[in-house]
Image: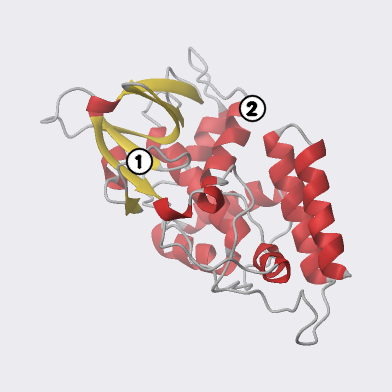
Amino acid sequence: MKSMFYGLGLWLIEKLVKDQTKKDVMKYEFSKWMTDSAPKSPGSGLETPLYQDQIKIIGGREADRVSKPSEFEAEKPKKSVNETVKQAVHAYLSPFAIAERERSKGVKEISGSRHNPRVLLYHLCVNGAISDDETPWCSSFMNYCVIMSNLTKNPAKQYKSMVKGLAKAKVEKIIEAFQKEFWPLDLSHDTGIDIVEPTYNAAAISWEHHGQKTTKYVQGAIMVKYRTTRSDWRRHVTFVESENGSMVRCLGGNQGDSVNITSFAKSTISWMGIV
């Protein structure tokens, strides 16, 4: 009965909620509620603890991981409805979904001596004392998206990573920002799910070789491109949104001084990795 209710709930959210960001959050909250209220006895259909080896991401427009599994891994035997429900018990927001949330806020640089607090928040996610919104922030934005996604995925593991990678004051502000926008965190809760390791580096080139290398333009993949020539070490990092002929539509930060979707030529790509 629980499994039927769970499946129906996800179906209703998918059909009735149009806004993708709201849809991602509602799916996460519904899955979290189902997990918390799930029966503990084996064979009940929604057992806890979480099924760590077979997690199905239902947040962040990651349908390709389900509809096109051959692009990510070898085909697996079809699973029962009950097994599919088990996989979906723990849903989380992908880095791409976090980026979509930021785009919906209309984040952009402020001209003059003032600086956008949102961009300064992104800069908290990298090392160094950056206190303006003019310093290139595409990598800061990518780190922010990955960190926030990881905190929905495995709070304990991401917290340990941040403690090693960033100054304590920055870590505290990031945690505070997350809890203000999303939900309270239990930083001791290790879900057993792997995280995408942030670079904590303001240089876009630090994202080269991140993720599983791909030549397919998969939505949500991390893409690094040359800013000028191939001999120039400077890069721009962004998310693949879709393919359009010889161009790739990309969702990222510091694109025209804002968070938006911009098209780049495929010939400028230096790396694409699925995360």
Nearer to the camera, 81 or 184: 81
The relative height of residue 259 versus residue 183 in the rendered view (above or below) is above
Question: Which is in the foreground here, disc 1 or disc 2?
Answer: 1
Amino acid on which the number 2 mark rests in the picture: Ser
Residue 266 location (% of width, % of height): 28, 27
Q: Is residue 223 left or right of residue 227?
A: right
For image coordinates 76% across by 84% down, the residue present is 43
Q: Residue furthest front?
A: 78
* Residue 256 percent coordinates (x, y): 42, 17
In the picture, the quarter occupied by the N terminus is bottom right
Question: Sequence-wise, which precedes: disc 1 or disc 2?
Answer: 2
Q: Which mark is residue 70?
A: none
Residue placed farthest to the bottom in the image? 42
Q: Is residue 225 left or right of residue 113?
A: left
| Residue density around tag 1, few if under 14, some if 14–19, many if 20 or more, within 10 Å | few
What residue is drawn where x is 54% and y is 48%?
Answer: 67
Q: Of helix, strand and loop, which one carries label 2?
A: helix
Q: SS class of the residue under badge 1? A: loop
- Taking 228 as reference, is 14 above or below it? below
Question: Which residue matches tag 1?
Answer: 216
Nearest the viewer among 165 and 72 is 72
Q: Kindly tell me whether residue 245 is visible in this rendering.
A: yes
Q: Is residue 184 left or right of residue 255?
A: right
Q: How many marks?
A: 2
In percent of width and height, residue 87 lies at 64, 66
Which residue carries the number 2 mark? Answer: 104
At label 1, which amino acid type do we have?
Lys
For the residues marked 1 and 2, what is the alpha-carbon distance in whole angstroms? 26 Å
Residue 129 seen by the camera: no
